[in-house]
Image: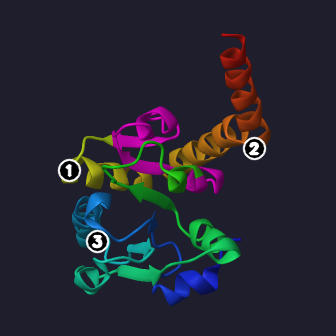
Amino acid sequence: YRSEALRAEWGAAPGAPVLICVGRLAAEKNLDTVIEAFAAVQQMDPRARCVLVGDGPLRESLAGRVPGLILAGQRKGEDLARHYASGDLFVFASLTETWGNVTGEAMASGLPVIATRHAGIADVVKDDERGLLCEEHDIEAMATNMVRMIDSPQKARAMGLAGRAYVEQHHRVEVQVANLQQILERAAKR
């Protein structure tokens, strides 16, 4: 579903790196870390774009903050899938997620994940296998991880494929239902 037309709407030239971040535009999502890290990347490669998909109370304050920052608004269904598929990397710095559905969605879309090592995110995004992790609020490390993935497209692709395989194996509905059934059966035996 990668859309070159959508990338062109974002002002992304052919070959330009596009980072995607999906979620509510709110303080608990720690968007400052993502945006400040992206600003460092943008200084190195002005063609780079960072697309924030979602809406929330910070939308107005984020608009125009950094060149190349695109506010795509809230998206659903096929349109959301097209946004994921049209990016090159998924970036996520939320401090409140236990797992983060958007992380799984990004991995299912084949995107390598750059995220903060927080709660369940670190369990899903195995560092240096399905993505790259950094500590909370570590803007320099997040920017470094962004650059590592941009400069190593083969490694980024391999991480994206590993993430997709992980989600397909561990997070299919059938697997989740079977896991829940086992938990309920154990509880009933007690």
Residue 66 as seen in the image, left or right of residue 9: left
Q: Is residue 172 above or below residue 13?
A: above
Q: Which residues are magenta?
A: 105-133
Residue 28 as seen in the image, left or right of residue 5: left
Tell me how far mark 2 sits from mark 3, CA to CA: 39 Å
Q: Please name the residue that numbered disc 1 is placed on.
A: 137
Residue 148 as seen in the image, left or right of residue 183: left
Q: Is residue 72 above or below residue 182?
A: below
Find out whether residue 135 is within the magenta segment: no
Q: Earlier in the sequence, mark 2 or mark 1?
A: 1
Q: Residue at x 55, y 48 (%)?
A: 154
Residue 61 as seen in the image, left or right of residue 169: left
Q: Residue at x 48, y 82 (%)?
A: 13
Q: Position of residue 116 (x, y in %)?
A: 33, 45
Q: Earlier in the sequence, mark 3 or mark 1?
A: 3
State how many labels appear: 3
Q: Nearer the viewer, mark 2 or mark 3?
A: 2
Q: Please name the residue that numbered disc 2 is placed on.
A: 173
Mark number displayed over residue 127: none
Q: Nearer the viewer, mark 2 or mark 1?
A: 2
Can see residue 87? Answer: yes
Q: Secondary structure at mark 2?
A: helix
Q: Is residue 61 above or below residue 89?
A: below
Q: Residue at x 26, y 80 (%)?
A: 62
Q: Please name the residue that numbered disc 3 is placed on.
A: 42
Tell me how far mark 2 sits from mark 1, CA to CA: 33 Å
Q: Position of residue 11 (x, y in %)?
A: 45, 87
Tell me how far mark 3 sits from mark 1, CA to CA: 19 Å
Q: Earlier in the sequence, mark 2 or mark 3?
A: 3
Q: Position of residue 106 (x, y in %)?
A: 56, 56
Q: Residue at x 21, y 65 (%)?
A: 36
Q: Outermost residue, right direction?
A: 174
